[in-house]
Structure formats: structure tokens, C-alpha cells
Amino acid sequence: MNRSDRRETMELEIPFGSNCVRLSGFEWLIVAVVVSALFYCVPILWKHIEKLKPGPDYRLPYSLSDDYWLFSRYCQWACSREKTLVIGDSVVWGHYVSKENTLSGYLNEVAGRHKFVNMGVDGIHPVALAGLLRYYGRDITDKDIILHFNPLWTSSKKHDLQIEKEFNFNHPKLVPQFVPNIPCYKVSSSVRIKSVIERYISFFSWTSHLKRAYFENPDLPRWTLEHPYENPLKNITLQLPASDGYNWSGHLPWYEKGVTKQDIQWVAIENSLQWRFFKYSVELLRKRGNRVLVLLGPFNEHILQRGSINTYRQMKKKIEAWLKQNNIPYYMPEALPSSMYRDASHPLSEGYVELARQLFKSAYGGSD
């Protein structure tokens, strides 16, 4: 038998003979257990390595607005203390003011102690907020909460996510991926499935945190292509970005920035997708034993034309009726003076001072 014949005979006699190692079913089970343990333990261990020590008037870094793993950590920190959580979008976060000049910052000043925590997330519209609270805010139980509703999200069908044309909106990973359908959200099934998996397996949200915090958000393979001679481990400094980073474009009211009055085509509140999900958030928080106070606005009515103002006020009445019907405490302030607004919904520092004073007096009777 020549050498070629012997080789063919050996290949027939030894199945998978080219493999260096073959694992049995039991060995594959051990591998699965080890990998699963790593998936579970690594994000937990990382919390002890990368310290999160929020100081007074802390808020999530602007550059990490879509870092939901960090939001979850912040929730755990806040909920382990006797704090009132102020939850909402950039109006709560304080888009045009420093962290000390936000609504929660001035509420703390009025209260005389650091009782209120800024849980605002920049750009978090109500549909996304519902997902954030459901999947990443599980620790928020048995807490006092001020939940802000910004009417801006019902100011057009586009803001309400009801148009059919695709556009890039904030926080797409948090919206329902399959049911109910979001008309303008048109991505592949693989992208949707990846978003769903990330909600339930913290390892994947942790890896997203690493990319956002230390690699300016690109995928690691892309980063290595752009930085072929750099060690990626050097980027992991364990130092999170500062909790400020607000949009400073001059502390001027809206009318001094050249903004004109607007004829807003409000979405009927009973047909609004954003309002539907805001109600879901209220109900979810209450089911978890939280005591929720809803803060509506205050929207800048000075920027509206007459017809838009009338429609807006009718919408407020319908919202108020729902809150009363469901025995939900609320505060619905009148519009602040025109000079206290930066745009349609964001107050300037003076506006936050006045809003905090009114809200504290309404909710707490002027005493702590």
C-alpha cells in the first residue's frame, strides 16, 4: 500500500481526524456554564472597578445620554438612598443650564438639603422613557417620584412618531421593536433582535457602555481599523465623563435669539402615541409601589400663535381630566414669564428657580 492509500485509509477510519480537540456533550455543557457565569459576573465585577460616586446635583453625562447600563447603575445608587427622583427629558436634565441650575438643583435649594435627584435623560421622549423605566429602571420601587411630561412631544405627528417616512429619532433601542409598530422606525430584524437581547442580558448593555464611555461609540473592530497601532486597553481609563456638558449658546431668552411665534399643529391627545406611553410609564411606576406626582410643562405659551394656544389649553384640560380620574397627584403650572424661556419648552436658570419654588410649595406646602 503506497503512502497515498494509507492516508485515505486513515481519514476513513478517524472521523474528524483533522480536529485537534473534540468536546463531548458534557464538556460542552461545562463550557456553556463557564461562559454564562462570565456573562453574568463581569458586569457586576465592573461596578466595583469603575467607581460611580455621584456628587450633589449629579446628572448623567450628556455624552452618555444613551448609556442605559450607566442609567441602571445610577438608579441603583439613587434608590438605595432616601431621595425623590425627578424623571424626564432634557427639561429635567437641564439642556441650557449647568447642573446646579436645574429643576432638581433648585428644589434642593428650596428644601435646604439634597433630597431631589436629577434622573433626567437628554432627548428621552415618552415612548423611549417607557422602555427605559421598564428594562433599565427596575430598581425604582417604593420611591417618591416627580415625573415630567413635555407637551413638545405631541406638537406634530413627527414628534409623535406617527409619520410613515423614516427619520432618525432619539433612543431607538428603547422603543417597542416589534409590537406595537412604530411607523417611522424602519430597521432590520437583526437590529431589533439585538436591541431586545441587550435589555435582558446585562453583558451586552455593559459592552455598549464601554464603547460609549471610552471609544466614542464606534464598534471595537472599527476603532482598531482607525487606530491600528494603539492598544485599546489604554482607552479604558475608568474615568467617566463629567456630569455637565450642557448646551451653552448664550443665556438669552427665545425672542432675543430670533425665534418667531409658531403655529403648532398639535396631535389630538387621545390619538397621541407619546401620551399613550407616558400613561404606561405612570402606571408601571405605580405598580412598583412608587408615589408619582406628574409635572406637566410648563410649555412656553408665549411662542404660540393664538390658534395653537387654544388647542394646547384644551389638550391640557384632557390630560388633567385623566389624571384626576386615576387619582394621580399632579402639578400643572401656568406658563412662566416669556423672558424665562430659552425655546419652546426649556427654561433658563431664572425659569427653573421659579418653577422649583412653585412646585415645592404645591407638593410640600412650602415645608420639607
Image (cartoon, grey):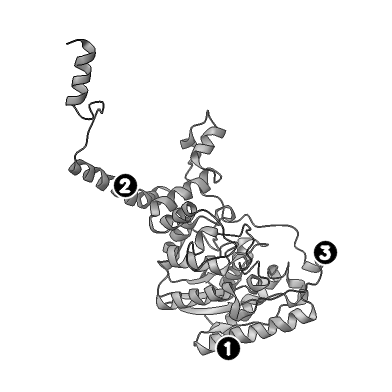
Mark yes or no: residue 52 visible: no
Based on the displayed image, in which of its 4 quarters is residue 127 positioned? bottom right
Based on the displayed image, in which of its 4 quarters is residue 330 positioned? bottom right
Residue 257 in the image, given as x and y percentages of width and height: 80, 63
The image's mark for residue 58 is none
- The residue that mark 1 highlights is 321
Q: Earlier in the sequence, mark 2 or mark 1?
A: 2
The image's mark for residue 38 is 2
Q: Is residue 308 above or below residue 346?
A: below
Q: Earlier in the sequence, mark 3 or mark 2?
A: 2
The CA span between labels 3 and 2 is 55 Å
Closer to us: 33 or 293: 33
At 48% across and 32% down in the image, what residue appears? 231
Local SS, label 3: loop
Amino acid on which disc 2 is placed: Leu
Local SS, label 1: helix
Mark yes or no: residue 166 visible: yes
Closer to us: 317 or 189: 189
Q: Disc 3 vs disc 1: which is toward the camera?
A: 1
Q: Is residue 39 above or below residue 254?
A: above
- Quadrant of the snapshot with the N terminus: top left
Local SS, label 2: helix
Residue 76 in the image, given as x and y percentages of width and height: 41, 63
Amino acid on which disc 1 is placed: Ala
Q: Earlier in the sequence, mark 3 or mark 1?
A: 3
- The residue that mark 3 highlights is 258
Residue 237 in the image, given as x and y percentages of width and height: 49, 42
Query: Few, some or many C-alpha atoms within 10 Å of disc 2 (few <14, some 14-19, many ≥20)?
Result: some
Residue 3 in the image, given as x and y percentages of width and height: 22, 11
Based on the displayed image, in which of its 4 quarters is residue 294 positioned? bottom right
